[in-house]
Image (spheres, grey):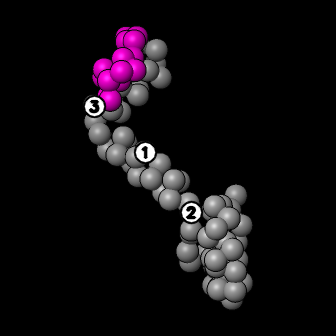
Amino acid sequence: MPSTYNIKEAQANLTKLCRSGRKFVISNRNRPVVVALPVEDFEALLETLDVLEDPAAMKAVRAAKAGTAKYRALDLSDENFGL
């Protein structure tokens, strides 16, 4: 669970909070108004959303989860691993 700071605390410690590399929430009158997260987490979130909106990728995920997907060896010399 990310730490929560009120606006005044966040303003006073923004540089420190950003450099910490952790997620945090800024609240206004005890209501969350902003979520800050490291760029790596943001990029991972966007990548997950890309997979979720791709019907072919989701079909492959469902098949793997059900155990009905065929095993294919990955080609580690290929940028796309031979997929």
First in sequence: mark 1 vs mark 3: 1
Label of residue 37 in the image: 2
Element type at marker 2? Answer: loop
Element type at marker 3? Answer: helix
For image coordinates 65% across by 86% down, the residue present is 11
Callout 2: 10 Å neighbours few (<14), some, many (20+)? some
In this rendering, position of residue 54 left or right of residue 15: left
For image coordinates 70% across by 80% down, the residue present is 13
Res 81 quadrant in image: top left
Magenta residues, start to end: 70-83
Task: Name the mark nearer the viewer: 2 or 3.
Answer: 2
Q: Residue furthest front?
A: 77
For image coordinates 29% across by 39% down, the residue present is 54
Residue hosting label 1: 48
- What amino acid is labelled 1 in the image? Thr
- The x, y position of residue 20, in whole percent, is 68, 65
